[in-house]
Image: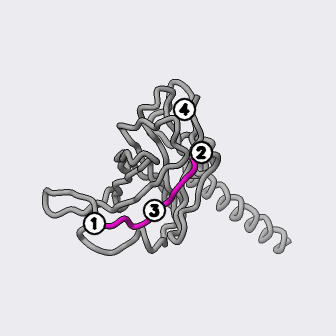
Amino acid sequence: MRWTRLAIIGFVAVLAAVFFFYLDNRTFNRLTEDHQYPMLVEPKSHPVSLTESSTKIPESGIHMTKLYTMQNNKNLFLGIWYRDSNNVMNAEGDEWKRTDGEVQLLVKAVDENGTTFNGETKKAVRGTFSTFQYIHFNTFNLSEESKKLDLYFYPVTTDGEKEQPADHPWFEVSVPVSSFE
């Protein structure tokens, strides 16, 4: 009888832990598995995906969602996620601008024509052991002949009131893009 009680208590404890992890990671998992668009506000119409799948950024331990744009091709939306123990995103230093403990990034997207678009991190969603950051480009206009985008991720430094990107990107990636017709 004693073993039966212990087995039931153990089963309930495991069930409670699974339920906790499910609730704690629900939004994070939906974002990282492309079940939810990396947008702060749910769009009225379906965005267009510019990439085939999510991408792992080399030598950083950071993953990036698909790239999305709206039908009018005026904005670009994406997200990055990483483990809480990630060495790149957990760099020590008082000079980095942080929001809710997360280093803020300026993201530069450069198309094949050399046109540069600037985006920035907007908000973070925390899972149990990982973090997701939304990235939004307000001005974006991908030309039809572009076949790839180069993305450069710069941490934002703060010196009193003045904010500016660091001199060199922390990480970068080139992603093939498809046309958005």
For the residues marked 2 and 1, what is the alpha-carbon distance in whole angstroms?
28 Å
| Gap in angstroms between the C-alphas marked 1 and 3 | 14 Å
Q: Which residue is mark 1?
A: 167
C-beta proximity under 8 Å, tags 2 and 1:
no
- Residue 78 in sight here: yes
Question: What residue is rendered at 56% in x and 41% in y?
Answer: 50
Query: Is 165 inside the magenta-drawn segment?
Result: no
Residue at image x 49%, y 72%?
85
Marks 1 and 4, how far apart in space?
33 Å
Give the class, few, some or many, for how many residues have Cα within 10 Å of label 2's Cα (few <14, many ≥20). some
Looking at the image, tell me whether mark 1 or mark 3 is earlier in sequence order.
Answer: 1
Picture quarter with the N terminus? bottom right
Q: Nearest the camera: 111 or 87?
A: 111
- The amino acid type found where label 4 is placed reads Pro
* Residue type marked 2: Thr
Circle 3 residues within 10 Å: few <14, some 14–19, many ≥20: some
Q: Earlier in the sequence, mark 2 or mark 1?
A: 2
Residue to which mark 4 is pinned: 47
Q: How far across and down, in percent of the image, does residue 178 sit?
A: 59, 40
Instruction: Give yes or no for contact between labels 3 and 4 (Cβ–Cβ under 8 Å).
Output: no
Q: Position of residue 65 (x, y in %)?
A: 55, 50
How packed mark 1 is, by other alpha carbons closer than 10 Å (few <14, some 14-19, many 20 or more), is few
Mark 3: amino acid: Glu
- Magenta-highlighted residues: 168-176
Task: From the image, state whether disc 3 or disc 4 is nearer to you.
Answer: 3
Give the residue at mark 2: 51
Magenta residues, dominant SS class: strand
Is residue 23 visible from the viewing direction of this image?
Answer: no
Do the residues bearing badges 4 and 2 touch, measured as CB atoms within 8 Å? Answer: no
- The residue at 40%/70% (across/down) is 90
Residue behind mark 3 = 172
